[in-house]
Amino acid sequence: MTTAAVTFDGSVGRAFIEKARQLIAGEYLPKIESCLQKLTDEQVWWRPNSDSNSIGNLLLHLSGNARQWIVCGLGTEPDARKRQTEFDARDVIPRDQLLHTLTATVTEVDGVLASFDAARLLDEYQIQGTNTTALAAIFHVTEHFSMHTGQIILITKQLTAQDLHFYDL
């Protein structure tokens, strides 16, 4: 893939980064927190079958992914992620501990994005064994958070049989 000779106007690039920050920390994380408040530790680790992930696995995975792509990939932290362990986990890690880990990761992600130079959005980075731009990495983490937040919401609705009222006006 070749990158076109394009530069970002500071306001457009900054707006993109700020929107990603708002979505991850201001929309997706609060929805996940709300779901976890409605569930027991055992429900957080429930899975419909052995080939499916529990909410607990998804929380570990979101933390690992965001940390690898943003904190380590765009930031300066070393990448020590062992991705498969996020899916292999079966022991009941308390939901409060899982939420603490995810919240800490989101805080780190937000810090990296808050100080990220928008003029570097098209710079290339090697993340998870692939070459990608900062823009693509930020977009990936944002859409990845969205997808798994939706899964967490669906599982929570299935387990609690209640409307979560996220969009009540």
Image: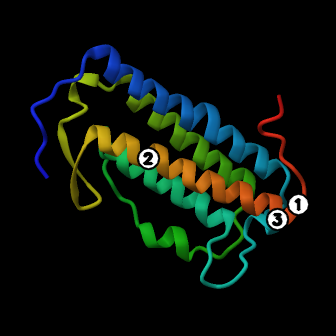
Return the mark for residue 26.
Answer: none
Image position, residue 32 (x, y; %): 69, 47
Give the labeled residue for mark 3: 158
Q: CA distance from mark 1 to mark 2?
A: 28 Å
Give the labeled residue for mark 2: 141
- Mark 1 touches mark 2? (CB < 8 Å): no
Residue beneath the point at 84% across and 61% down = 40
Residue beneath the point at 67% across and 48% down = 99
Residue 127 lies left or right of residue 45; in this view the side is: left
Q: At label 3, which amino acid type do we have?
A: Gln
- Within 10 Å of disc 3 (Cα), the crowding (few <14, some 14-19, many 20+) is few
Give the labeled residue for mark 1: 160
Residue 91 lies left or right of residue 112; in this view the side is: right
Q: Residue 165: name its quadrant.
A: top right
Image position, residue 92 (x, y; %): 72, 69
Image height check: is 10 above or below 6? above
Q: At label 2, which amino acid type do we have?
A: Val
Question: Secondary structure under badge 2?
Answer: helix
